[in-house]
Image (tube, rainbow, N blue to C red):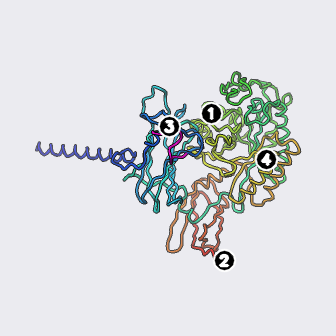
């Protein structure tokens, strides 16, 4: 009996060892760390490089370089900028085979951040599938005494039918500097396929972004600041009027506000006014303090200011502590109701008009909270859209983006545009498409075009261009730039052209972004039987999406009506079914 029990005990132990061993082996293979996996690519060429990336390695923009700070000697890649990426050399693949990638990653920043992969499966030079990996967190480096392992990023995908080569790219989720080392691509036997960027339904239909009948979307917006905002704090960079008396500029902001309202009234267009905190005030004779009366030590000559004065005194020290009657350039509370009563949208240009990429997460939190509190005194809802002062998104930390998301911000504009620093670009006017913010996809970043007397011709050209590709643009300026006859004429030309085009949807930027976010959340299901394909669309949001324009892809038509265009309204969680069939392009539609 004891011998039998011993054998049972031994058997259980062996089984446990086998289970643990199997679990360990599967985990190692899932992490792309098993030495028995065939290695198709490593970073040996990277370690041997002394300048620039090795042949076959590519970067999406400046901000990617080789450095000696590494896991265990050799070299690593240093990547800086949310607008760049690192591409590995292409490797030959076989359809149906599992492939995994792994890399060690570390954030050289006060903030954690995140990284993901993008997989381009090709047949020859043609991309037959594009897929994205999961965002995975990257821990921050804690200094010279930090002995903890770097974060391990790993991801697996399966080569689709027809794939002959693969290119993998690494993308960051913020402007935090990150190090990447010990790259490896291997074959695998475990893991599942990633979802395609384009759903299966995209082979049959194209869901257009704007309401049926519209080929483009335009928002008109203004950065509307009192003397307390960017005017008294002007930088010599990104401010064409830096050095001008802030009181003169504040009064021009008032005049321009009235002029701008007149532009839109005949067409009943709703614009967006991005405002600072002092816009809500009738005055401040009580000497109320805001945001803890901060001193922003980063407001220096090195960072673009004309002097170091604002790095040494309170940001609000210039407040005259008067009211609208005594100091109308400093407080715009009397103009809030005229803007709102005309149907326009009031959103955030930050409370303090600070530099977003230099502000800390706690400064962001304090600023966003102060804006909401003062807006509430005017019955203005918390802002869901934000325009960066000075287009200052360059340098945004991951945890700073966290603060915007936590405050309920869902759309952004005036992000970094400096042509000399493309690694910080999130969107561009030429692309004319809103883009989910990498790593914080609940926020949509929309492109803008600075409308002045010099740029009006380009604005009209861009307007015509986006009408041919479902584009979107936000035309903007400061309200102080709608004061001279020439400035008013420039704005009038673009407003009139948008109205007379007949196919341009004009709405507040927040409204445009909300529609696109709702469409991005659509789920689709495709069922093919015989020669007919059925596509089911489901609106997973809580809001009805009206007049969704859908175009059949070339070679297909809708069974109902035998047309290549359709428009549907999608109620929350109520599926809508479309039936499509092959369509002879050489035969006229009846």
- What is the crowding at mark 2: few (fewer than 14 residues within 10 Å), some, or many (at least 20)? few
Q: Residue at x 52, y 55 (%)?
A: 130
> In this rendering, is residue 122 above or below 81?
below
Q: CA distance from mark 4 to mark 2?
A: 43 Å
Name the main secondary structure of what is drawn in magenta.
loop
Q: Is residue 24 left or right of residue 301?
A: left
> In this rendering, is residue 87 above or below 361?
below
Q: Which residue is mark 4?
A: 455
The disc placed on residue 365 is: 1
Q: Which residue is mark 3?
A: 50
- Badge 3 marks a residue whose secondary structure is loop
Mark earlier in primary sequence (2, 1): 1
* Residue 440: quadrant of the picture: top right
Q: Which residue is mark 2?
A: 588
- What is the crowding at mark 3: few (fewer than 14 residues within 10 Å), some, or many (at least 20)? few
User: What are the residue bounds of the magenta stretch?
Assistant: 48-58
**Magenta stretch: includes residue 51:** yes
Q: Residue at x 60, y 32 (%)?
A: 361
Q: Position of residue 329 (x, y in %)?
A: 83, 32
Q: Are marks 3 and 1 in contact (CB under 8 Å)?
A: no
Q: CA distance from mark 2 to mark 1?
A: 59 Å
Q: Is 549 or 25 nearer to us in this picture?
A: 25
């Amino acid at each position: 009996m004891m011998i039998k029990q011993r054998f049972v005990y031994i058997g259980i132990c062996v089984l446990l060892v086998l289970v643990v061993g199997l679990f360990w082996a599967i985990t190692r293979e899932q992490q792309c760390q098993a030495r028995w996996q065939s290695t198709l690519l490593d970073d040996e060429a990277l370690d041997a490089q002394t300048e620039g990336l090795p042949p076959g390695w590519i970067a999406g923009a400046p901000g990617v370089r080789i450095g000696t700070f590494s896991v265990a000697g050799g070299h690593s890649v240093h990547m800086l900028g949310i607008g760049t990426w690192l591409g590995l050399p292409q490797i030959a693949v076989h359809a149906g085979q599992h492939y995994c990638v792994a890399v060690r990653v570390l954030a050289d920043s006060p903030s954690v951040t995140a990284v993901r992969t993008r997989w381009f499966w090709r047949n020859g030079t043609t991309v037959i599938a594009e897929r994205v990996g999961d965002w995975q967190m990257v821990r921050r480096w804690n200094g010279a005494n930090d002995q903890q392992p770097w974060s391990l990023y790993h991801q697996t995908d399966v080569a689709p039918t027809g794939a002959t080569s693969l290119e993998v790219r690494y993308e960051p989720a913020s402007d935090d500097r990150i190090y990447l080392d010990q790259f490896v691509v291997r074959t695998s036997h475990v893991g599942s396929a990633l979802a395609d960027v384009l759903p299966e339904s995209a082979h049959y239909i194209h869901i257009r972004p704007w309401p049926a009948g519209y080929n483009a979307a335009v928002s008109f917006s203004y950065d509307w600041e009192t003397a307390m905002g960017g005017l008294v704090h002007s930088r010599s960079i990104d401010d064409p009027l830096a050095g001008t008396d802030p009181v003169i500029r504040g009064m021009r902001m008032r005049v321009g506000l009235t002029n701008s309202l007149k532009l839109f009234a005949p067409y009943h267009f709703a614009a967006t006014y991005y405002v600072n905190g002092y816009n809500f005030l009738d005055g401040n004779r009580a000497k109320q303090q805001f945001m803890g009366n901060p001193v922003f030590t980063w407001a220096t000559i090195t960072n673009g200011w004309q002097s170091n004065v604002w790095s040494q005194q309170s940001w609000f020290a210039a407040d005259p502590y008067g009211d609208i009657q005594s100091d109308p350039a400093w407080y715009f509370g009397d103009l809030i109701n005229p803007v709102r009563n005309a149907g326009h949208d009031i959103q955030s240009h930050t409370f303090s008009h600070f530099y977003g990429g230099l502000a800390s997460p706690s400064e962001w939190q304090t600023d966003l909270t102060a804006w909401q509190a003062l807006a509430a005194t005017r019955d203005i809802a918390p802002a869901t859209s934000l325009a960066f002062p000075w287009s200052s998104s360059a340098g945004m930390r991951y945890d700073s983006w966290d603060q915007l998301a936590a405050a309920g911000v869902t759309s952004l504009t005036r992000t970094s545009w400096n042509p000399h620093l493309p690694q910080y670009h999130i969107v561009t006017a030429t692309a004319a498409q809103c883009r989910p913010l990498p790593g914080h996809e609940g926020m949509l970043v929309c492109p803008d075009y600075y409308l002045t007397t010099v740029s009006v011709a380009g604005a009209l050209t861009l307007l015509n261009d986006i009408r041919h590709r479902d584009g979107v643009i936000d035309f903007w300026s400061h309200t102080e730039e709608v004061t001279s006859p020439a400035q008013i004429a420039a704005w009038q030309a673009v407003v009139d052209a948008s109205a007379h085009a007949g196919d341009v949807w004009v709405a507040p930027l927040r409204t445009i972004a909300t529609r696109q976010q709702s469409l991005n959340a659509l789920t689709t299901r495709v069922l093919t039987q015989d020669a007919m394909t059925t596509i089911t669309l489901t609106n997973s949001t809580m809001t009805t999406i009206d007049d969704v324009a859908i175009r059949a892809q070339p070679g297909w038509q809708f069974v109902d009506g035998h047309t290549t265009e359709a428009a549907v309204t999608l109620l929350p969680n109520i599926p809508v079914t479309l039936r499509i069939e092959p369509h002879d392009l050489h035969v006229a539609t009846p």
